Image (cartoon, rainbow, N blue to C red):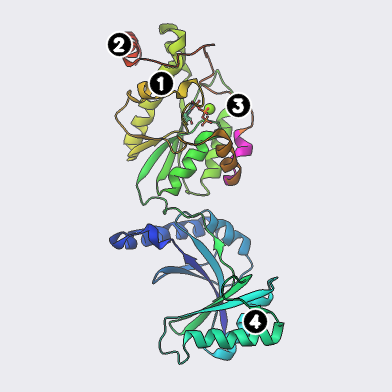
Amino acid sequence: MSSRVIIVHYDEIAIKGKNRPKFEGQLVDNIREKIKIAKLKGEVQKKYGRLDIVIPELDQKEDWIRLLQTTFGIANFSFAVLVEQDLEVIKNQCLEEISKQEFETFRITTQRSNKNFPIGSMEVSKEVGAYVFENLKKKVDLFNPDTTCFISIVDNFALIYSEKIQGPGGLPVGINGKAVVLLSGGIDSPVAAWYAMKRGLRISFVHFHSAPYTSQSSIDKVEELAEILRTYSPNAKLTSIAFGDIQKKLKLQIPEKYLIIFYRRYMLRLAEKQARESGAKVLITGEALGQVASQTLENMIVVEQAIEMMILRPLIGFDKKEIIVKAKEIGTFETSILPHDDCCTLFMPKSPETRAKLADILEIEAKIDLE
Ligand code: ATP
Ligand code: MG
């Protein structure tokens, strides 16, 4: 008898006391949702301090790795073989697992939560270690081994695995509520969305486009970015809002140097409305401090005072270089750099105001005729 189990570990430091059942419940739900979408076969079971996913066979290992590496809340996971609680069987299985790897030194680590198993965990490790040594002539190194074979004696079987694959960490999507991400076609906002999801926010997107003044391909590109980000948070909805007419009307009524500030104030108002309608508690943008004219502290303060809802800016302290590295890692970079028409550069002034004052903005805004 032997079957396969994926052992999923989460970072226990991240969850304190009574939050734990909520954390585990959300993580289980999220994994099940993704299994369904990926059409994989696996049964998720909650165990003490870990999750087990019982899978029928191992022919879709790559798909499982992709699924789990894009599920926030997972610290690491291992493909384990489940065998009888019999020392001979355990020895042979460890030898088989460890033989798949290239190494010079190894250790065996045993954990025994079934105290009815007659042999202590130190003893199991010693016996199995000696057996591996006899067969492979590789050395034991308890402190800095090239590889470790883990034996977990639980319930009435033993789990054996030798590789821990890193997960993305963070908190399960949804555990901290909902957020609306302002998604442009650029490099930054998809990365901001990723960080928001990483801290447990379930996101949806709003995008402002200026069709027919800008092309359809720009809208398609944003849909493509949303689709990539759905790997991390399935079903995240994208709402595309036509913004061109508002821009046109604003352009006729306000000094050119303030245009971007007004565009942004109206964008935020529409995003806030969208957020309230969808039950989201917060807005997310890809702004960093001082990156472009619209991102001076003065302008950001004036812009955000158009709304009451809190705005989170996960990239505030990032350098552009760091954002690009992350964008490549999460798979949005190649799409972000495709050419597109940015609705904010449409009707864009040559020298925008960088130190807007709220009083000036409010005075102009009071005279604007716009529904
Ligand atoms: P990005 O790389 O995300 O486009 P950026 O460096 O171009 O950002 P800005 O143009 O100042 O910076 O935009 C700041 C943020 O405002 C964006 O990260 C995004 O969250 C939001 N934003 C800008 N334009 C749009 C848009 N057309 N639709 C939705 N959100 C937008
Ligand atoms: Mg942009």
Range drawn in magenta: 330-336
63 versus 190 height, above or below: below
Return the mark for residue 95. Answer: 4
Name the N-terminal-most of marks 4 and 3.
4
Q: Residues within 10 Å of mark 2 (few under 14, many from 20)?
A: few
| Residue type pointed to by label 4 | Leu
Q: Is residue 202 magenta?
A: no
Q: Nearer the viewer, residue 263 or 131?
A: 131
As measured in the structure, the alpha-carbon distance from the residue carrying label 4 to the one carrying label 2 is: 77 Å
Residue 263 at x, y percent in the picture: 43, 19
Name the N-terminal-most of marks 4 and 2.
4
Name the N-terminal-most of marks 1 and 2.
1
Q: Which residue is mark 3?
A: 340
Tell whether 73 sits left or right of 222: left
Quadrant into which the C terminus falls: top left
Name the N-terminal-most of marks 1 and 3.
1
Name the N-terminal-most of marks 4 and 1.
4
| Residue type pointed to by label 2 | Ala
Q: Quadrant of residue 297?
A: top left
Q: Which residue is mark 1?
A: 299
